[in-house]
């Protein structure tokens, strides 16, 4: 029998016996049984004896476990003994009655066998361990395994990204929320879960919350190739009577600068003016307001008691003004109009 690594050898690590992914062992040594050796006691073994003298110990591993008792496969009282060293005929450094077995007195001629499974079993076990490490488990594979790398590439290049934002996130019921979808990939199916029992299959959707609560939103998307992406925003929308909705509105200004006819979301049409009053109706301990009019101009109002500003658009166009509210506790909130201001 050729010399080879054994699972009982010092320094053995799981995987050392396997022929996968490269042939560590040759076929003959892989199936050679270093364990399960058999011999018999050459001298009796009293209770107090620490050295075990046998007929031939050369087939046993350098250290390990042996079993004294009935022949292999037969039932009966047996003693498991650990040995730290051996010669060709003597086991030394023993621990009697190992792993809870009964320490007994044995007679010359009693059977002595190795109590560890054959190396073939360990080689198969090691092959499975290596396959798991190199190929990767079906679920939660190691990132460095083949399956793990393929999963990462699939996620990067094939799986869609489910992206969305909503407005408003807070307010009293009934709260009408607009869901805007920005998902990437060749998406063919959308499934919204609004957290209150409501669902939708539309790309962009408006949903109304009638009951107070804090809602978790989930968007699932599927591509034409079957790739799936999911985004969950936990406790994303708060509906409460205590949450006053921030808003501002726009009206035709009394400022005299006739230049254009205008249309706004408020229904103003045909007015001969390009100046507008912007009126903030937001509540809370507001420290300052930053108005961004959408034409490149902005205005900061540091007096929290001033709710109105006037702005004149210098050219026809469609503008999307926004308001940045800065509260006394340094929280910030962006407020937008539902529809743009149109100057024609």
Image (cartoon, rainbow, N blue to C red):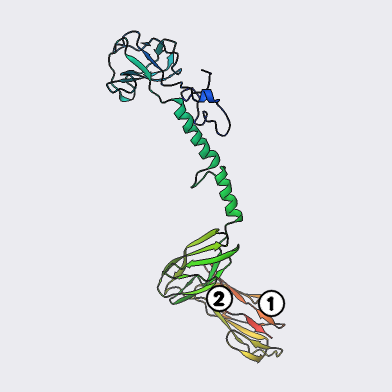
Q: Is residue 37 above or below residue 257?
A: above
**323 sits to left or right of 140:** right
Residue 176 locus on image (x, y percent) = 48, 76
> Considering depth in this image, is 72 or 236 the residue closer to the camera?
72
Q: CA distance from mark 1 to mark 2?
A: 24 Å
Quick one: SS at disc 2? loop
Q: Left or right: where does residue 143 sit relative to residue 175?
A: right
Q: Which mark is residue 240?
A: none
Q: Residues within 10 Å of mark 1 (few under 14, many from 20)?
A: some
Q: Is residue 80 above or below residue 230?
A: above
| Residue 308, position as x, y percentages in the image | 59, 81
Q: Where residue 235 sits: x, y (%)?
A: 45, 64
With 79 as the anchor, is 26 left or right in this view? right
Q: Count all numbered tags in the image, as a single digit.
A: 2
Decide which of 87, 307 is in the foreground and name it.
87
Of circles 1 and 2, the one toward us is 1
Residue 157 seen from this side: yes
> Is residue 330 among the parts visible in the rendering?
no
Label 1, on which residue?
A: 295
* Residue nearest the observer in this picture, 328 or 251: 251
Residue at the spot of label 2: 304
On screen, residue 243 above or below 29? below
Look at the numbered disc 1 and give the secondary structure of its residue.
Answer: loop
């Amino acid at each position: 029998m050729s010399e080879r690594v054994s699972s009982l050898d010092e320094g053995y690590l799981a995987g050392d016996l396997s022929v996968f992914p490269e042939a560590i062992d040759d076929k003959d040594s892989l199936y050679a049984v270093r364990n399960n050796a058999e011999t018999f006691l050459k001298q009796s073994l009293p209770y107090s004896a620490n050295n075990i003298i046998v007929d031939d110990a050369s087939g046993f591993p350098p250290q390990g476990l042996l079993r004294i008792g009935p022949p292999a496969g037969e039932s009966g009282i047996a003693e498991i003994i650990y040995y730290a060293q051996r010669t060709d005929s003597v086991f030394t450094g023993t621990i009697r009655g190992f792993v809870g077995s009964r320490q007994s007195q044995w007679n010359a001629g009693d059977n002595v066998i190795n109590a560890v499974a054959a190396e073939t079993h360990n080689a198969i076990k090691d092959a499975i361990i290596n396959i798991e490490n190199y190929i990767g488990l079906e679920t939660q594979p190691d990132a460095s395994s083949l399956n793990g790398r393929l999963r990462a590439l699939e996620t990067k290049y094939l799986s869609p990204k489910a992206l969305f934002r909503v407005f408003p996130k807070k307010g009293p019921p009934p709260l009408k929320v607009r869901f805007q979808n920005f998902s990437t990939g060749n998406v063919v199916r959308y499934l919204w879960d609004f957290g209150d029992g409501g669902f939708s299959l539309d790309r962009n959707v408006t949903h109304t919350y009638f009951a107070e609560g804090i809602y978790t939103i989930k968007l699932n998307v599927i591509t034409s190739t079957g790739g799936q992406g999911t985004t969950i925003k936990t406790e994303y929308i708060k509906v409460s009577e205590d949450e006053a909705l921030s808003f501002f509105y726009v009206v035709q200004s009394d400022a005299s600068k006739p230049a254009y006819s205008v249309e706004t979301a408020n229904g103003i049409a045909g007015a001969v003016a390009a100046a507008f009053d912007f009126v903030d109706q937001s509540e809370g301990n507001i420290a300052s307001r930053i108005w961004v009019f959408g034409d490149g101009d902005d205005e900061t109002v540091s007096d929290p008691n001033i709710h109105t500003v006037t702005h004149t658009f210098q050219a026809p166009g469609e503008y999307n003004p926004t308001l940045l509210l800065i509260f006394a506790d340094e929280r910030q909130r962006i407020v937008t109009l539902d529809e743009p201001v149109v100057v024609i």
